[in-house]
Amino acid sequence: AGAAASKLVSLKDLKKFRKSVNDKVENNKEDMSSVFIQLRSLNEAFDTLSQVLVEEVDSARAEISKTKVDLSDQVTLLAKGLQTLTPEVLNLRPAVENFAPIAESANSALSAVQKLRQWTESGFRRLNEAMTVQQQALTIVDTHLSSIQDTLQCLQQVKAELKSLRKETADCRAE
C-alpha cells in the first residue's frame, strides 16, 4: 500500500499540469490569431499594390494608344504631302518646310513613349518590392507555423504523459 501511495499523483500536481496545458493552448490560439491578422494585412497590401500597377499600366496603354493615333494621322498627312510633291527642286523646299511640324510631333510622340517606359519600370520596381515584402511575410508565417508545430508536439507529449499518469493511477487503484 505504501508503494502504491508513492506512485499516485497529487491533486495539486494534476491541477498545475492542467493549468500548464491550458496556458499553452491559449498561447497557440493567440499565435494563430496573430498569423491570420498578418496574412490578411499582407493580402490587402498586395491587392492595393496590384491595383496601383494595373492603373499605371492602363494609363500607359491609353497614352500609347493616343500617341499611335497621333502618329497615324501625322503619317497620313506626310503621305499626302509626298504625293503632292513635284519632281521640281523649287517645289521640294516648301515640302521640307511642311515636314518640320510633323517631325516635332514625332519627337513629342517619342517623348511620350519614353515616359511610358519610365512608368512601366516604376511599376515593375513597385511590384518587385511588394513581392519582396510578401516573401518576408511568408518567412515570418513559416516561423510562426514551425513554432505552432513545436507546441503541438509538446502538447502531444503532454497528452501521452497524461495517459500514462492515468494508467498508473488506475493501476494503483487496482492494487
Image (tube, rainbow, N blue to C red):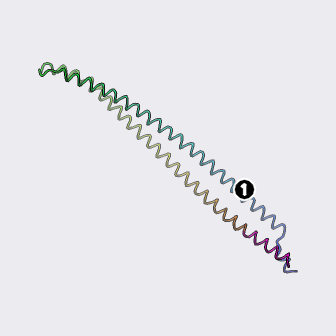
Residue 91 % position (x, y):
15, 19
Horizontal relation, residue 125 to residue 27: left or right: left
Give the quarter of the image for residue 113: top left
Residue 132 % position (x, y):
49, 49
Name the quarter where the N terminus is drawn.
bottom right
Horizontal relation, residue 38 to residue 127: left or right: right
Instruction: Identify the residue at the far right of this view.
Output: 1
- Magenta stretch contains residue 167: yes
The prevailing secondary structure element of the residues shown in magenta is: helix
Total labels: the figure holds: 1
Q: Amino acid at mark 1?
A: Glu
Q: Residue at x 83, y 66 (%)?
A: 12
Horizontal relation, residue 117 to residue 33: left or right: left
Residue 156 % position (x, y):
69, 66
Q: Residue at x 60, y 60 (%)?
A: 146
Q: Residue at x 46, y 46 (%)?
A: 128
- Magenta stretch contains residue 102: no
Q: Residue at x 44, y 43 (%)?
A: 125
Residue 157 % position (x, y):
70, 68
Say which residue label 1 marks: 26
Give the quarter of the image for residue 28: bottom right
Is 112 drawn above or below residue 1 in the view shown? above
Name the quarter where the C terminus is drawn.
bottom right
- Crowding around mark 1 (Cα neighbors within 10 Å: few <14, some 14 to 19, many 20+) is few
Q: Which residues are magenta?
A: 160-175
Q: Secondary structure at mark 1?
A: helix
Is 66 drawn above or below residue 32 in the view shown? above
